[in-house]
Image (spheres, grey):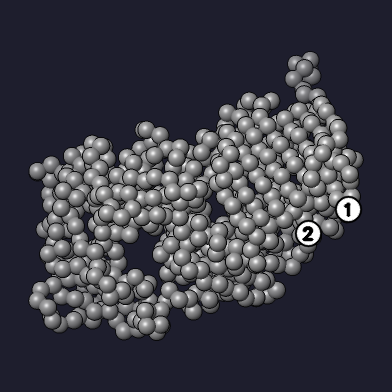
Amino acid sequence: MSDASESRQKVRVLPPALADQIAAGEVVERPASVVKELVENALDAGARRIDVEIEGGGRRLVRVVDDGSGMDADDARLALRRHATSKIVSADDLWGLRTFGFRGEALPSIAAVSRLTLATRPPDAAAGFKLTVEAGVETDAREAGIPVGTQVEVRDLFFNTPARAKFGKSEATETANVSEALLRLALANPAAHLRLRVSGRVAMDLPPHRDAAERVRAALARRGAGALHEVDGEEGGCRVRAFLAGPDESTNTTRNTFLFVGGRFVRDRNLLHALGLGYGPLLEKGRYPMAALFLDVPGADVDINVHPQKLEVRFARAQEVYAAVRHVVGAAIARAPWLRTTDDRPMRTFTQPPRLEMAGAAGARPVRMGAAALALPRAAQSALPLRALDLDDDVFGAPDADAAPSPAAPRFFADLSYVGQVHRTYLVCEAPDELILIDQHAAHERVAYARLRAAHARKQMARQQLLFPIPIEVGEAAVAALEADDVLGGLGFEVTREGPAAILLRAVPEPLKDADPKPLIRELLSALVDGTPLRAGELDRVDHLLATIACHSVVRAGDVLSRTEALALLGQLDAVDLRSHCPHGRPVLLRLPLGEIERRFGRA
């Protein structure tokens, strides 16, 4: 009995300092969270100019200066108390709220884990008020001569919570996160002038724009976006407005897809999925568009109070909301300029079964194959010369010794009887008791990846110097990540900085000498920004980057292959490992047994 009594834990009220640190853990995840909360407060205060400065990725210093309405001394002190807010009075105010902050926890949470100085002055005051707080405890308060607005300095973030600090990322990654947070706020607030300085150098400067369209185009151009197709429609009370880049500018991360609900940036997998469905077959599986989507729903139909940082929302009529996005975007995509040829006629849609080009002499008779109506992307309809299939050892290097089969290993692909190419995408081959369809892009990608991997392991990545260096807009976050870790150099690229948001490409890996390097560079840098910069030994992430290079250096669906090129590809497949799948996991071949063919024709 006594043992049970001793083991029973008493219920206690946490000390205020510990409670504040726990609350801070919900709101202040990293320096970017501090920037987000402080800039949102400035926007709510009507600021039209907001200057952000960081040092040490934001852990050493975050300074936010705005020209908003400011506060008097009493309000400044109240703003540093938990659950104090000027945004709501009753529970009903939570529905249809249009301001950013309302929980009343941002400033006290930040102050609980930093050394914070708040200086503020309202328009009707002769002088401002300056308040200094360390780990949530006020240490100084006095009048200050400052302009109208608010200035917040946050120093030594997490200095009193070392367990939290050790989970921080590298300085470059934290800087990239800050840049990303500021860009998201800029997209939703075109009237505000937002500027970011990193260690004294201007890294982002977005002056005010007339409207959302002008702001989105200016901001996404820094990410390399070309022409953006504007979408505006309404369904079931949901207004959908979006700015969409072409499918060729998609990436395998969500970094360039911005979703906003009621002016707030959110993360929502279903909303992202609905946007992807709007693109339909133009968007490959696993790819995400460069786009900014703005969704407005009636206030009573959305709950914005489900996440401490308000990064998630909950819809009362979720399926109707997702359907509205899918339908409005889908209808606009059908009219998008990417589906038009150079003479501005609608892109050709195949309603007749595609032809099977028989291997052999030109002019061989076509063979009809049953197929549903389908539309190819504009790239597949291009009349420009297609990139040649290049499998020379001096380009890709010799196959990886560990991947190559022993001399006694049975051949498979090289022994197939090549029949022809169907739909300029699949190689049709015959084996003794089956029909084989081979995805030419996946197959070539597998070969290129194996050779790139071998060359990288030997530190012999051949590179091609460019006669004229290529400037590429990639965004501030990508430039910061690249400066912290020149992983691209080990992959065969030569890159130098060209301003706060651009780089200059001077050399490319040899296999990419005939390809457009801009989409690949942006995709590789997106992968770097999304995670901790690569270090030696992180083979899985290096392999991912090599697979991305391979994908951009090989033939694609829609490219015509000669018989010689097709046979060369089949011969090379036997010399690589895991040749049944491409580096991204997609199957290389489809096998149709003779028995199955006979069964379908009623012969079995």
Of residues 321 and 140, which is closer to you in this image? 140
Q: What is the secondary structure assignment of the residue under circle 1?
A: loop
Q: Is residue 467 above or below residue 332?
A: above
Q: Specify the quadrant that holds the C terminus.
A: bottom left
Q: What is the secondary structure assignment of the residue under circle 2?
A: loop
Q: Is residue 580 visible?
A: no
Mark seen at residue 97? 2
Q: Amino acid at mark 2?
A: Leu
x, y (%) of residue 339? 42, 76
Q: Is residue 23 above or below residue 587?
A: above
Q: Is residue 458 above or below residue 584?
A: above
x, y (%) of residue 353? 29, 81
Q: Amino acid at mark 1?
A: Val
x, y (%) of residue 581? 29, 53
Q: Is residue 589 left or right of residue 326?
A: left
The residue drawn where x is 49% and y is 42% is 480
Q: Is residue 488 visible?
A: yes
Query: Label 2 neighbourhood size at 10 Å, few (<14), some (14-19), many (20+)?
Result: some
Q: Which residue is mark 1?
A: 89
Q: CA distance from mark 2 to mark 1?
A: 12 Å
Quadrant hosting residue 35: top right
